[in-house]
Amino acid sequence: MNRFTKLTAALMLAGAIAVVPAASAQAAVVANQDAGTFISSLGTEAFAVLKTGNKTAVRSKFRELLSQHFAIDAIGDRLIRRWNNQITPQQKAAYKAAIPNFIIGTYSDNLYDYANASMKVIRTAPAGSGFNVVTRVQKPGAQPISAVWSVAKVGGAFKVTNLTVANINLAVTQGQDFDAIIQRKGIDGLIAMMKARG
């Protein structure tokens, strides 16, 4: 992924990474009601925490949020779906274990460029079995960036299933990067890269 993609992805993930405990509980309630309010709630609290500059706390909350509000298993499966028939159960388990740390290691250090940004929900529209929540992120002195959060009910609560940032589908882009690594180094090479980055 190039720097622009990483930065814009980080920007969108900043909308959810660092929810304080009370906000996390609030988001859990909202997740059962309205997709747009769910994303807005996460974003408001996350940008507030980013302003503290506490990287240890941000990473800790990012990990917590990924497990609670992102469909990590489904996202991970989508990224390597063309290789599923060639992966052993042990490799699949190692890959799934590496995903959270990989995401944190790939994106978290870019988030602080957006500590002064704000996110606004523009509209929510049905999409398949879930919703697309269109947002605009405004960084002072910069052009606004649009993003679409794909969310769906999983186990009765909304979870983020994908992001499309400035017309870049992050699942597709990351999947292409993973494909290239697997073609060169195999699934074990991909897992090693993910662990090194995390």
Image (cartoon, grey):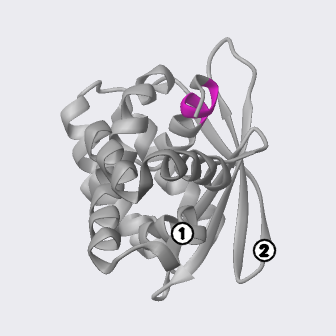
In percent of width and height, residue 22 lies at 28, 59
Estimate the spatial distance between the alpha carbons at disc 1 and disc 2, rounded to whole Å. Answer: 27 Å
Q: Residue at x 29, y 47 (%)?
A: 192
Q: Which residue is mark 1?
A: 83
Residue at the outermost left position:
56
Q: Is residue 115 left or right of residue 59?
A: right
Magenta span dominant secondary structure: helix
Q: Over which residues does the magenta segment extend?
A: 4-8
What's the amino acid at mark 1?
Trp
Looking at the rendering, which quadrant does residue 28 occupy? Answer: bottom left
196 or 86: which is nearer to us? Answer: 86
In percent of width and height, residue 142 lies at 69, 16
Q: Residue at x 35, y 76 (%)?
A: 88
Q: Which residue is mark 2?
A: 127
Q: Is residue 33 visible?
A: no
- Quarter of the picture containing the N terminus is top right
Residue at the outermost top position:
141
Q: Residue at x 36, y 49 (%)?
A: 189
Residue at the outermost bottom position:
156
Magenta-colored stretch includes residue 6: yes
Magenta-colored stretch includes residue 119: no
| Residue 4 position (above or below residue 17) | above
Q: Is residue 65 visible?
A: yes
| Residue 80 position (above or below residue 121) | below
- Of marks 1 and 2, which one's residue comes earlier in the chain? 1
What's the amino acid at mark 2?
Ala
146 or 2: which is nearer to us? Answer: 2
